[in-house]
Amino acid sequence: MTNKKTTAAPLPLWQYWRGLGGWNFYFLVKFALLWAGYLNFHPMLNLVFLAFLLAPIPREKLHRIRHWIAIPLGFALFWHDTWLPGPESIFSQGSQIAGFSASYIWDLIVRFINWSMVGAFFVLLVLWLFISQWLRVTVFVSAMVVWLAVSPLLPAFILWPSGQPTTAAATTAQANTGANAAAGAASSPANSDIPPQTEPPTSANLTNWLNAFYAAEQKRKTPFPDQLPADAQPFDLLVINICSSPGRILKPPV
């Protein structure tokens, strides 16, 4: 009598699906920042990153390696979704940053941290840990990322404060509004040429607002008389130049 050796059949691939785990909180923070208007969310890049995290991997070792690889990728993607300057801008200003004193750097850090937002994130973390005991948060997070990725392709149905209408009618209405505003600006002072900052903070809207601001500022002028009256008192002229270039705001005070 011989013993037959049987090998275990490999499990179907769908049985290796795993949840996002701690990455759920990563995406929940992004949703909160997006809702508050603090994030320039890139739906397709985040959808690809989500698929990378959820793809089933049979071997546990490879699954752990994937999470180690995802940490720098997630950090880079989060930075890309914010309004912070890119690495090339930071490196180009390296000589100026190197001249910062320790007290000035500490002052920047204190001003940069929003403690109210830190407290809100802590509450969000506790809620996630509590709710995840009964609900699969991965399903909710995945559905939200997919919705944000496909919603620009669907008729306008605004759920987010930063959502934008994408239908032809909405586009035409925006064009007509812009044309009327431009026509009214021709007969109004320079200050009224600057459009209100009410549009979503997308790259295109920010560029359009900046160009309109530059066009309005070019119309400003201060006329000086050719000569002063005989009873004029002597005075000194003080010129203050305020640089608004993003690359100069990191210059330390002297």
Image: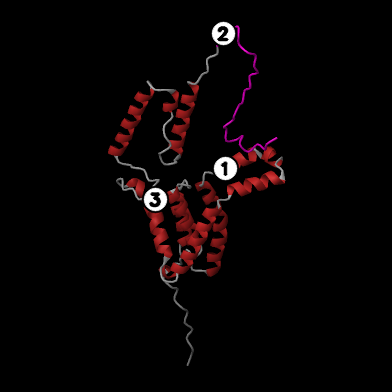
Estimate how packed mark 3 is, as few (under 14), some (14 to 19) or many (20 or more) residues with alpha carbons within 10 Å: some
Q: Residues within 10 Å of mark 1 (few under 14, many from 20)?
A: few
**Count of number-bearing discs:** 3
Q: Which residue is mark 1?
A: 86
Q: SS of the residue at dot 1?
A: loop
Determine which residue is flagged by label 3: 149
Residue 7 sits inside the magenta stretch: no
What scheme was used to colour the molecule? secondary structure
Position of residue 53 measured from the top left corner of the image (x, y, whole percent): 48, 60
Mark 3 lies on a secondary structure that is helix
- The relative height of residue 143 versus residue 108 in the rendered view (above or below) is below
Kind of residue at disc 2: Asp
Position of the C terminus by quadrant:
top right
Q: Earlier in the sequence, mark 3 or mark 1?
A: 1
Amino acid type shown at disc 3: Ala
**Residue 229 within the segment the image draws in magenta:** yes
Q: For the stretch drawn in magenta, what is the main secondary structure?
A: loop
Alpha-carbon span between mark 1 and mark 2: 48 Å
In depth, the one of 127 and 174 nearer the eye is 127
Residue that label 2 marks: 226
